[in-house]
Amino acid sequence: MYNYNTWIKYQKEEILINLIENLLLESGFTIINKTEHYFTNQGYTGLWLLAESHLAIHTFPEEDKIYIELSSCVKKYFDYFIKHFEETTTINFI
C-alpha cells in the first residue's frame, strides 16, 4: 500500500476538486464513487472511492489550509498522481 498526505494552502474547493478528479483519471485510477459535504459556515470534505483505494480532502478555510490524503495499491498510478499534483500545487504547499 502506498500512502501520501500533505497540507496545502487553502484555495477554492471547485479548483481543487477539478484538479484532483482530472489527475486521478489521468493517472489511471478508476473512480468508483465520490461523496462530499459542504459545511454550513465554511469547509468541505470530499472522498473519492477508487478501485485502487481512496483519496480524501478536508478544507480548513479558517486556518487557510487543506489536508489531502491518497492511499493506493498501484504504484504506477500513485507515482503519476503525486508527481503531477506536486508540480501543479508547488507554490501552494504549507
Image (cartoon, rainbow, N blue to C red):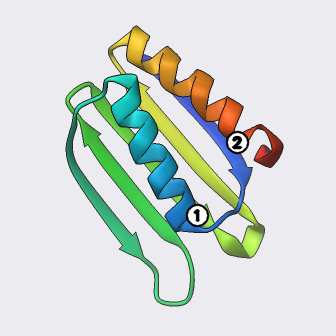
Amino acid type indicated by mark 1: Thr
Residue at the farthest top position: 76
Which residue bears the numbered disc 1? 59
User: Which residue is at the front of the view, 22 or 65?
Assistant: 22
**Mark closer to the chain start, 1 or 2:** 1
Please say if 74 is above or below 12.
above
Give me the residue at 42% from left, 77% from top: 38
Callout 1 secondary element: strand
Please say if 44 is above or below 78.
below
Give me the residue at 39% from left, 29% from top: 26
In the image, taking residue 66 as reference, residue 26 lies left or right, namely left
Distance between mark 1 and mark 2 Cα atoms = 15 Å
Frontmost of labels 1 and 2 is: 2
Please say if 51 is above or below 58.
above
Q: Quadrant of residue 62?
A: bottom right
Residue at the farthest bottom position: 41
Give me the residue at 55% from left, 55% from top: 16
In the image, taking residue 87 as reference, residue 1 lies left or right, namely left
Callout 2 secondary element: helix
Task: Give the percent coordinates (x, y) of residue 88.
Answer: 67, 38
Give me the residue at 25% from left, 42% from top: 49
Amino acid type indicated by mark 2: Thr
In the image, taking residue 34 as reference, residue 16 lies left or right, namely right
Please say if 35 is above or below 85.
below
Checking the image for residue 37, the label placed there is: none
In the image, taking residue 79 as reference, residue 51 lies left or right, namely left
Which residue bears the numbered disc 2? 89
Task: Give the percent coordinates (x, y) of residue 51.
Answer: 20, 29
User: How many C-alpha atoms fall within 10 Å of the one at disc 1: few (<14), some, or many (≥20)?
Assistant: many
Task: Give the percent coordinates (x, y) of residue 93.
Answer: 78, 43
User: How many C-alpha atoms fall within 10 Å of the one at disc 2: few (<14), some, or many (≥20)?
Assistant: few
Which quarter of the figure is the N terminus placed in? Answer: top left
